[in-house]
Amino acid sequence: MSTLPVQRRPRSLFGEFSSLFPEFSELFAGFPTGLRPVVDTRVLRLEDEMKDGRYVVRAEIPGVDPATDIHITVRDGQLSIRAERSEKKDFDGRSEFSYGSFVRTVSLPAGADEDDIQATYDKGILTVSVAVSEQKPAERRIQVQPAGGQ
């Protein structure tokens, strides 16, 4: 009898740990994104890829109004996505949702055109697309000519 191999997804203790001790998220809220510990539950989760000559970043940001709650900026090769989810004050039950400010900054690839950026929001997913021109080689060789035109 043949058996199929079972694939088990590793579970992170950090996700469970952060839900048990939510004050850790508040403690590290002021840290820059790259310095926040893994237990921070208020980090925007991203996917990125190169597709058809564009650098595409997708961010999971459900429950926000893209017109008022999402701000995208680009400066010096850095793309920043900031979102704000406000807590409803008339809610008396239990909530595991994260509220407050969410920020992520990614470095754009070489050749990114900061003047050709598009953003869409659909079903809780923000998609930002940046045109990338063909990259030039990082170095080129310069031929040394003899003095005097010889």
Image (tube, rainbow, N blue to C red):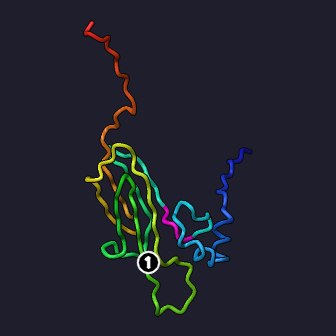
78 vs 99: above or below: above
Q: Residue at x 34, y 58 (%)?
A: 74
Residue 72, position in %: x, y? Answer: 35, 64
Residue 21, position in %: x, y? Answer: 66, 77
Left or right of residue 2, residue 91 in this image: left
Tell me if residue 98 is in the magenta stretch.
Answer: no
80 vs 25: above or below: above
Q: Residue at x 37, y 52 (%)?
A: 77
Task: Tell me the SS state at disc 1.
Answer: strand
Left or right of residue 24, residue 48 in this image: left
Q: Residue at x 34, y 72 (%)?
A: 66
| The N terminus lies in quadrant | top right
Observer-nearest residue: 96 or 68? Answer: 68
Q: Residue at x 71, y 47 (%)?
A: 3
Residue 140, position in %: x, y? Answer: 37, 26
Observer-nearest residue: 12 or 43? Answer: 43
Residue 67, position in %: x, y? Answer: 30, 73
Magenta span of residues: 41-45
Task: Decide whether the magenta segment is chiefly helix, strand or loop.
Answer: loop
**Residue that extends furthest to the right in the rendered view of this protein:** 1
Q: Amino acid at mark 1?
A: Arg
Left or right of residue 80, residue 115 in this image: left
Which quarter of the picture shows residue 24? bottom right
Residue picked out by circle 1 = 85
119 vs 48: above or below: below
Q: How many marks?
A: 1
